[in-house]
Image (spheres, helix red, strand yellow):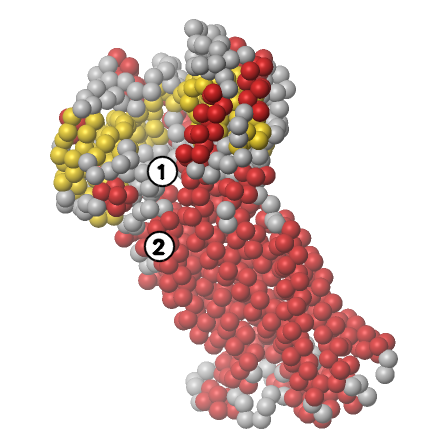
Amino acid sequence: MTARPVLRAASGRVSRRRTQTIVIFLVLLVSGASATLGLALLAAANGPFDHAFAAQHGADAAVSVNPARAADSQLAATRHADGVTAAAGPFGTVSATLSSQGFVLPSAHIVGRASAGGQVDDLTLVAGHWPQSPNQIVLSESLPIVPGLGAPLTASTAPGKPRLTLVGIANSITSTADAWVLPAELGALRSPGAPAQAEMLYRFASAGTAARLRGDVRAVAAALPTGSVGGFSSWLTARQQANSNSAILAPFVEAFALIGVFMAVLIVANVVSGAVVASYRRIGVLKSIGFSPAQVVVAYVVRVGLPALAGCVLGVVAGNVLAIPVLDKSAASFGVGQQQVPLWVNVVTPVVMLALVAVTALVPALRAGRLSAVQAIALGHAPRQGRGYAAHRLASRLRLPRAVSIGLAAPFARPARTLGTLVAIGFGVTAVVFAVGLDSSLARAEQGQSLATTAPVQVFDGRAPSWQPGSSLDKTIAAAIRAQPGTLRSVAIAQTELSAVGLTQHVQAQASKGDAEWLGYPIIAGHWYSGAGQVVVNTAYLTQSGLSVGDRTQITGGGRLVTARIVGEVFVPGNNPALMTDWRTLAAVAPGTGISQYDVGLRRGVSPAVYVRAMNGPPAVRAGYIASGPQSGQFYLIADTLIGMLTLMMAVVAGLGVLNTVLLGTRDRVHDLGVFKAVGMTPRQTIAMVMCWVAGPAVVAAAIAVPAGMVLRTATVDAMARAAYTGLPASFQAVYRPAEIAVLALSGLVIGAAGALLPASWAARARTATALRAE
């Protein structure tokens, strides 16, 4: 027999079994998209800074130079200094205070550049365009808050307070500037009497350690007149921060990505193998008319391969489209410019998926090819003798409607197919439980860091980084806060750096003038400080000092040494030691420390944006604000986006897996459906019976998946906390309430019902004569 009958048999089944063909296509499409996105996320979380640093030709060092001592020609000659492989500049720089609609950026480092590109520090434009006229500006994406494009910005420290228009947002992989303008604009932004400044950007042959980088900068300085080089910023600092973000995100991204990939693989295997097994009767017919075992195998591998190939190709395309916004947020979270789906992902995903389809189709097809025509027809007509009879007898004794008891017993006739349904629903429920719990934990962490619900507005003065308590400026700001009807309460905050005995790093210290417990910083252990001489510290402080809650610690600042008792461990992630205390304690250690801001709690229903506009209205109080929420950290943006997108995709894949299984079941039982309808089963009873086919597996799947999802969430959150060098408050872990667990368990029934609804409707609409004739 030639190949033509084989291809005709394969293509004929594709056209006649349209529903099953569509299911295979959709499962491969969604699974391919899920696998593509999952692998892309895994690649994005693997050394994102190093990839972006190479792609953007990041600067190993941004060196501050004095153009009054070194001419441009001398600076250009440093390109040939020992160890230098590339250089850019000199770029003029100024420091200015930028403000816009409540946004204030004190001491912004502004650089004059004619274009975003270059051999060193090739900037990535995230939004908008590069300045095209002197009154335009581009801000760095790394700033804590960035106004929308088109917003006016005022350089309040420059003569005449020139106004600039925000036309773009850019990313510098090593954060070489806070903002960029055309070189011609720098003179207008320079404060009166401020000297001219510039910076040079360098890449070196070897700058893998801080010591080597210092040596490279010394070689540059030696090639210039004495006093030409000031300080420099290192790429190693940016890398450490980015890798810290990557380490925190990695457990979460890997968990979701692996769930998506494994789920796609298992459901594709279940769907494809089920499609071949369901065709045993047809295989028997083909063998009876002369098809050889090899021809049967080829016919059915091709039969599932055609829609699978189309689904894989479109799935990879869909995965790339879905990955664009996710990777954009991932890049912003890692602080690395742009990320793209790697080429190997676009190659590996369809190859692996198609190989999976071929293997899962080949195994049952080989088995069918070895059967005789009579055996294949018999297996295709009904399950093996005796399967499910005991379950049917037991179900018939229950006081349930007959349609329900038949539906509940039906899965026992096809245990392998039922296992596939259980696996599909189980993965879907696991993803839902994991997502809901992780989202709750991250929401509490975000609230604890950003004070989003307790102090959504922080008021400070753009003219001074700090001011003394009781000064005229302090009285003006405090009076303006009290005068606002939306003010619920406020507290003055001072921030400074201290030292502590036993710690090599400086301690980031924060003190409050007044009751600050209402701010709601999450406490991991112990309690909030209640008076002078008490401090709460973060996990990094305890880890690096070897102290515990209840111990005494010695802190110094301004030449004074004060002993304080550690009364609590506070949730402040990061490997930098942090301390919070009462104003009197700080005054004893570092007298003269000024107020840097007021944290303000608002009355119910008051918008932070409306409050800030009122604060900056007449009488004018030159105050700015930092709005809590999404702007408090890109990390939570990507987390929320990924949780929503990946959970939806996994639920869809699980629903398609259920749909395929139930569809095969209705095909198997088409004769039974005809008999049931002939003896009086109504369409509603038919739908109830078919829906009950998945009820039992859904309940079992939920019973397994709910605790599995909870355990996975706990392990993931613990791993993220370890990467962030912090412990976790108990409230971050106890996120599942009993009522919520019950609702999450019902998600298994929802996924099963959603997948079974279409085949159930088809079975209900089928005419009795048609069903009997189809047998």
Quadrant occupied by the C terminus: bottom right
Badge 2 marks a residue whose secondary structure is helix
- Return the disc, 2 or 1, that comes first in the chain's sequence: 1
Nearest the eye: 206 or 122: 206
Q: Position of residue 221 (x, y in %)?
A: 47, 21
Badge 1 marks a residue whose secondary structure is helix
Q: Position of residue 370 (x, y in %)?
A: 70, 88
**Residue at 52% across, 42% down:** 50
Nearest the eye: 588 or 755: 588
Label 2, label 1: how far apart the Cα atoms are: 21 Å
Q: Which residue is mark 2?
A: 718
Q: Is residue 574 left or right of residue 551?
A: right
Q: Position of residue 399 (x, y in %)?
A: 43, 85
Give the label on residue 450, or none. 1
**Residue at 37% across, 15% down:** 463
**Residue at 56% across, 83% down:** 414
536 lies above or below 494: below
Nearest the eye: 476 or 606: 476
- From where the camera sits, is residue 142 visible? no
Q: Residue 553 is drawn in which quadrant?
A: top left
